[in-house]
Image (cartoon, rainbow, N blue to C red):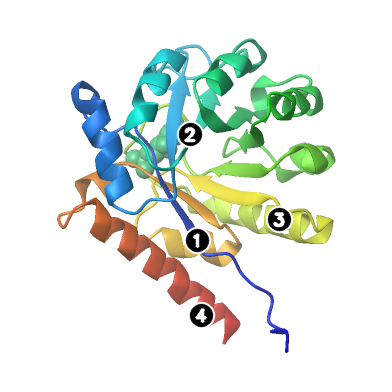
Amino acid sequence: MTDPTPRVPPPLIIPSVLPADFARLGDEIRDLCDAGVDRIQWDVMDGVFVPNLTFGPDMIAAAQQYSRVAFEAHLMVANPDELLSRYADAGCELIIVHAEACPHLHRTLARIRDLGVRSGVALNPHTPAGLVEHVLTETDLILAMTVNPGFGGQKYIPAVETKVAQLRRMIDESGLPIELEVDGGITAATISGAAAAGADAFISGSWMYAHPDGKAAAVKELRAAVDAVRNEVAA
Ligand code: DX5
């Protein structure tokens, strides 16, 4: 007897490496895996698209040996097309580009897939959901930024939740297996609003690293908060 209720995939809890101790990156990656995270996100910043400057592909390649989970690269860069193959070669299994930095977004997403990795597109808080309406067939993930990109530790922007709900409707109507991810200011308190709006993948940085009981407890608390919202919605 098949179960009539649609299977809702478990929430994906994904740390950003941004708050890590860069002098102990290998240990930090191992700790994140031990904490039970689903993937690890590298916030790649070029000092042009956003004011900060962070990880090159060689750092990510060097960290691979310490990880038991997949890496995703969030390219907050002005010219992502020039960097795609570098981050794919560094072992990133998912590459996320910003719609705001891609004049030929459809082609860029197709190129990411041609490299044999999954494609993702990110939208800054001000960018409307409609910008990805015609590229749903080319993307495996949509990332709705819940802060203005560039730095960790910023305040969650609740107004983005209406966009998350729009994106959830677009994805559901398309019938495509697209992950809906949020990133920025995600804590045990703010994750509930994002989950209720329809997000299924959650990036957490500063809150997870600062959790008084450690990263494993933080992961558990985030998962429990999403499950509570989903049970409420299902009831
Ligand atoms: C912003 C970064 C941050 C980071 C998460 O460009 O993308 O959102 O990943 O940082 P927290 O969880 O500290 O807001």
Q: Which-is-in-front pick, marks 1 and 3?
A: 1
Whichever of labels 4 and 1 marks the residue nearer the N terminus, that label is 1
The one of 88 and 75 positioned closer to us in this rendering: 88
Mark 3: amino acid: Gln
**Mark 3: few/some/many CA within 10 Å (<14, 14-19, 20+):** some
Helix, strand or loop at mark 3 = helix
- The image shows residue 91 at horizontal and vertical percentages of 51, 26
| Residue ID for mark 2 | 148
At x 36%, y 20%, the residue is 62
Whichever of labels 3 and 2 marks the residue nearer the N terminus, that label is 2
| Residue ID for mark 3 | 166
Label 1 beta carbon less than 8 Å to ligand 1 = no
Label placed on residue 231: 4
**Mark 1: few/some/many CA within 10 Å (<14, 14-19, 20+):** many
**Mark 2: few/some/many CA within 10 Å (<14, 14-19, 20+):** some
Mark 1: amino acid: Pro
